[in-house]
Amino acid sequence: MAAVKRFFPHIAFLAIAFSVAAVVVGQLVPDPYLDPVNVTVSEYAVADRGGVTEAGMAVLGLGSFVLLVALRAAGAPIRGLPQWLLGIWSGALVVAAAVPTTPIGVDLTTTGQIHRLVSIAAFVSLPAAAALLVPRFAADARWKPIARITEWLALAGGLGLLAITYVALPGDRVMIGLVERALLGAEVAVLAVVAAWLVRLSWGKNVRILTYHKFLTN
C-alpha cells in the first residue's frame, strides 16, 4: 500500500493536467457561436455534446481528492479546515460534472440550481484553503519553497471571487465567462503547484527538479 501511495502525487498531477486539456478542448468543440467571454464553462459544458468538459471537471475533482489523500499520507500541514475545504472542492466538482446546469435561455431547473450551489462551493473553498495553507507552508521547512507562490495564487483567487460576485450580481453577467476562467485558472494553478511539489518531495533527493527556491522564498 505504501508503494501505491507513493504514486498518488503523480496520479493527481496527471489528472490535473488531463482535466485542463479536456476543458480547453471542450471550449473549442461545442458551438462556434458561443462567446467564451460571456458564457460560463458550465454553459459550454451543456453545449458540449461529446461530454469532454464534464469529463474534465470530473477528472479534476477525482484528481483533487487523490491529491488530498496524498497530502495527508505525506504529512503535509493540511489538517483541520484546509483539508475539509479541499474535500468540499473535490466533491463539488464531481457533483457539478454529474449534474449539469440548464442551457442558455432556459429557466433554471432544480438540477441547474444544484449545479449553481455546488459551483459556488467549489469557487469559494479552494481559494480559502490556499489562504489557510500559506502560513502553514511558510512554517514547514519542506513546504516553505512554495509558500510565496501559494500566497500569490490565493490572492488571485480571492480577487477572482470578488470579481465574479460583482459580475454575477450587479454587473449583469458582463464578461462573466472571462472572469470565471481567470478564477478557475488561479484555482487550478494552486492544485498544480502543490501536486508538482508533492511529486518532488515523494522522490526526495533522487531527482533534481528546477524549483527556483530563491525566487519563490524571497
Image (tube, rainbow, N blue to C red):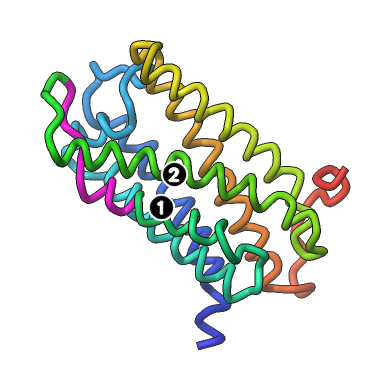
Mark pair 1, 2: CA separation:
8 Å
For this rendering, which residue is in front, 47 or 162? 162
**Residue at (70, 49) in percent of width and height:** 134
**Residue at (44, 39) in percent of width and height:** 123
Determine whether 34 is above or below 71 in the image. above
Residue 175 position within the rendered picture, expressed as x and y whole percent measured from the top left: 40, 15
Residue where numbered disc 1 is placed: 60
User: Element under label 1?
Assistant: helix
Residues in magenta? Answer: 93-104
Horizontal side of 144 relative to 63 (left or right) equals right
Q: Any mark on residue 127, and which?
A: none
How dense is the environment of label 2, judged by Cα within 10 Å: few (below 14), some, or many (20 and up)? Answer: some
Q: Is residue 56 inside the magenta stretch?
A: no
Q: Amino acid at mark 2?
A: Val
User: Element under label 2?
Assistant: helix
Residue 127 position within the rendered picture, expressed as x and y whole percent measured from the top left: 55, 42
Determine whether 198 is above or below 75 in the image. above
Farthest residue toward the front?
80
Residue 208 position within the rendered picture, expressed as x and y whole percent measured from the top left: 78, 64
**Residue at (22, 42) in percent of width and height:** 114
Quarter occupied by the C terminus: top right
**Residue at (16, 38) in percent of width and height:** 49
For this rendering, which residue is in front, 152 or 36? 152
Are discs 1 and 2 less than 8 Å apart at CB? yes
Residue 202 position within the rendered picture, expressed as x and y whole percent measured from the top left: 66, 72
Residue where numbered disc 2 is placed: 20
Q: Amino acid at mark 1?
A: Leu
Question: In terms of image quadrants, where is residue 77?
Answer: bottom right
Question: In terms of image quadrants, where is residue 118?
Answer: top left
